[in-house]
Amino acid sequence: MRIDILTGLPSLLASPLNDSIVKRSQSKGIVEIVIHDLRDYSLQNQRSIDDYAYGGGAGMVMSPEPIARCFDSLMDEREYDELIYMTPDGTTLNQPMANHLSLKTNLAILCGHYKGIDERIRQHYITKEVSIGDYVLSGGEIAAAVLTDAIVRLVPGVLNDETSALTDSFQDDLLAPPVYTRPANFRDWEVPKILLSGNEGAIEKWREEKAIERTKERRPDLYDRIRGNEED
Ligand code: 6GU
């Protein structure tokens, strides 16, 4: 899988994508993530990538030219499954969307800034608009890092333990059960006895019960959905 990220602030993206699982996915050669500085595609003197909004009002708008030129050069090289724009008015990211995107071959992700991007780019290039939740960030870079992380960890071979992505919170619409590590007694706080029993069947059942209990308590919306699904 290849992910191209278009941004006016490449330094904001470098660190979250060059550590941990996302880094491992790249060094294993499973995923290639390429960051493009939109200033490199500007035709203006000061390498500028934004301009005043037509009709007035506060805030700058990202110019169409650098974005279009960057997309054009990428699309000359390969076919893209999606050209994604990170924006608070996009579809909210969830686990099914991440699962779906993790099966793609080539994705491009555009990060917006300022007051957004010229609408014509959205009309003529963008195929999918994604938000990461109902709050406003200063730019799309951190949101793009979130989306990239959510996708990349699902690509087969990226995680060591192949099953571990399947047992994540949300993967079956349940939150994950509590987990413990050594010592069994920490400041007189004990690990639940069942986890020390070696009885795999009983442990699996306990984890399932705790996952359901936790989902019911913290996310009644998710809980109602799984109950609805079971009745179907
Ligand atoms: Cl994708 N961008 C910005 N700027 N803010 C957001 C967002 C994206 N998702 C939630 N808030």
Image: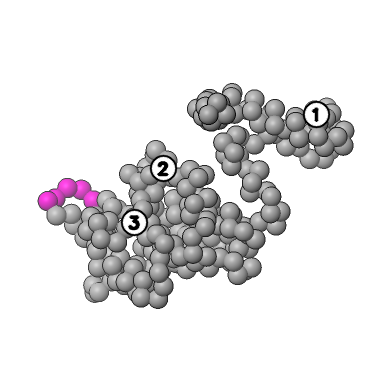
Q: Secondary structure at mark 1?
A: loop
Residue at x 27% of width, y 56% of height: 122
User: Which residues, given as a range, are shown in magenta?
Assistant: 55-59
- What type is the residue that disc 1 sits on? Pro
Label 1 environment density (alpha carbons within 10 Å; few <14, some 14–19, many ≥20)? few
Q: Nearer the viewer, residue 41 or 2?
A: 2
Query: Distance of mark 3 from mark 2, alpha carbons?
Result: 15 Å
Label 2 environment density (alpha carbons within 10 Å; few <14, some 14–19, many ≥20)? some
Q: Position of residue 79 (x, y in %)?
A: 40, 69
Provide the residue designation for mark 3: 127
Q: Nearer the viewer, mark 3 or mark 1?
A: 3
Q: Are marks 3 and 2 in contact (CB under 8 Å)?
A: no
- What type is the residue that disc 2 sits on? Thr
The residue most toward the front is: 232
User: Is residue 186 shown left or right of residue 24?
Assistant: right
Residue at x 32% of width, y 58% of height: 126
Q: Which mark is residue 92?
A: 2
Q: Position of residue 16 (x, y in %)?
A: 53, 57
Whether residue 132 can be seen here? yes
Whether residue 219 can be seen here? no
Q: Secondary structure at mark 3?
A: loop
Q: Which mark is residue 192?
A: 1
Query: Distance of mark 2 from mark 1, alpha carbons?
Result: 37 Å
Q: Which mark is residue 230?
A: none
Work out whether mark 2 precedes mark 1 in sequence or the reverse, and give the earlier one.
2
User: Is residue 72 shown left or right of residue 149?
Assistant: left
- What type is the residue that disc 3 sits on? Thr
Q: Are marks 2 and 1 in contact (CB under 8 Å)?
A: no
Residue at x 41% of width, y 42% of height: 92
**Does the magenta portion include 181?**
no
**Does the magenta portion include 56?**
yes
